[in-house]
Amino acid sequence: WADVATLEQSMAGRAVRLRGAAHAVRAVGRRVAFVVLRQGTSTVQCVVAAAAGGGDAGMVRLAAGLSRESVVDVAGVVSLPREPVHGTTQQQVEIQVKKLHCISRATPNLPISVDDAARSEADVARAKAAGEQLVHVGQDKRLDYRVIDLRTPANQAIFRIFRQVLLSEGFVGIHTPKLIGGSSEGGAAVFKLDYNGQPACLAQSPQLHKQMAVCGGFERVFEVGPVFRAEDSNTHRHLCEFVGLDMEMAIRDHYFEVCDVVDRLFVAMFDHLNKNCAKELETIDRQYPFKPLKYLPKTLRIEYDEGIRMLKEAGVHVEAMGDLNTEAEKKLGELVHAKYDTDFYMLCRYPSAVRPFYTMPCPDDPRYSNSFDVFVRGEEIISGAQRVHIPELLARQAEARGIAVGCIAAYVDSFRYGAPPHGGFGVGLERVVMLFCGLGNIRKVSLFPRDPRRLQP
Ligand code: ATP
Ligand code: AMO
């Protein structure tokens, strides 16, 4: 079996077998049919021709009758096209087909076509201005028929990037339970369920268990897994189920050791994407144009107070010692971009009052905390902090926020048996991809999005 993506002109004359989707089918009379075969983001034109004796007329008929998106096998010989191939995803070779089999026939009345779903809004607008009729498929319809929508080149590229790059810094992969006894973040946004007669919920984060793993002697742990949030309103960046990358590590001197991992992980990831995924990024840019992300070799770190000062100077009303709302965060992103020429930065030393109960207060001023958020283009992708490893302080902080210590007793107790100072962070991976590629809506980067209204497909 050969891959469409690796076909090249030097392979001319070689026999290959390919399996792919019939992206387009065109018959020319009864003697020739062209089938554009697609695998992932690549396509190749297959030529099905009847031999002079008419022996292969049946194969031409079969090809001409293929419905789009049917899965087909072809066996044939690589040849050079008569003219250079147009179209950005199509290979500069053709396949002269000797054998053709239809493996799975798609219904001839597809609810949406891949080409229609793949059209950029700019293309549709241009066609409309020129008086042409181009089908535009809205987002809801695309999500209803996600299995077809996922076949668009931009989606294929988005989900190839998604799984890449994890650090090789001695972190151990763990799996924490997703059925837990209560909220892990202290908020109300949990999906409740019945656990054989006990109240339970879907984990809002691996927070408590990743910390307990560090208490269990694993110095550095990470998890990539589902995170459940019963969000009650529709935004472009909230899902009810998303993929979280969480890490937790013992620290020696300062919580900046955790921030240093953010530096190494994300700068390496952005470099890797730009260097090794240029083709995928170009493909995404073709349908959803975006400006390349600006980032510095070492992440810019600004203190919360400095961020507040910048916003106030720009005339933005912000509450002293309060959380930043979405609008203020966006504005700060613009101010930081203008001043420091970066779209990627970290805001440190948040007020303790706006952080979860497990966050370590600053040793020099407990009104502030050893915590940070990281932003891409003015939107949050990461929250992180040093944690409280002193059980008495942890219990006090939980109570002060109205959390019954009885419900998290096992967690608090795990710090009574010797616990190293530690910290970590959580990243929303859909947000990273959405913001790196300037995609504007988290639904575009979630394979099967679960938003406050959508539970299908
Ligand atoms: P997290 O909740 O995980 O910390 P986040 O990005 O949701 O991450 P929040 O601190 O919850 O950040 O919210 C930041 C701001 O985003 C809020 O001040 C609010 O303006 C806005 N926001 C958060 N959740 C919603 C929502 N469900 N609907 C509308 N706006 C929201
Ligand atoms: P937080 O609640 O900020 O922190 O979540 C961490 C990151 O997860 C992403 N995120 C979301 N993505 C999509 N849809 C949502 N509804 C959603 N909510 C959050 C964001 C956010 O930065 N336990 C801490 C992390 C830690 O301190 O280690 C936590 O869960 O990108």
Image (cartoon, rainbow, N blue to C red):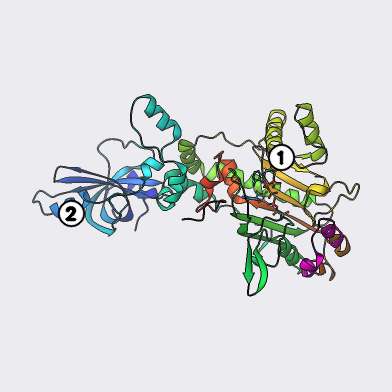
| Image quadrant in which you'd find residue 8 | top left
Q: Earlier in the sequence, mark 1 or mark 2?
A: 2
Q: How far across and how far down the image is residue 213, in percent?
A: 73, 66
Q: How far across and how far down the image is residue 315, in percent?
A: 76, 26
Q: Nearer the viewer, residue 78 or 125?
A: 125
Q: Is residue 20 visible?
A: yes
Q: Nearer the viewer, residue 103 or 352?
A: 352
For badge 1, the amino acid type reads: Asn
| Image quadrant in which you'd find residue 84 | top left
Q: Determine the residue located farthest toward the bottom in the rendered image.
A: 196
Q: Quadrant of ligand 1?
A: top right
The magenta-colored residue range is 395-410
Give the mark count. Answer: 2
Residue at image location 71% in from the left, 32% down from the top? 336
Residue 281 among magenta residues? no
Residue bearing mark 2: 59
Residue bearing mark 1: 325
* Separation (CA) of disc 1 from disc 2: 62 Å
Callout 1: SS: loop
| Image quadrant in which you'd find residue 391 | bottom right
Callout 2: SS: helix
- Foreground tag (1 vs 2): 1
Q: Is residue 174 visible?
A: no
- Relative to 132, is 6 above or below? below
Tag 1: Cα neighbours inside 10 Å, few (<14), some, or many (≥20)?
few
Tag 2: Cα neighbours inside 10 Å, few (<14), some, or many (≥20)?
many
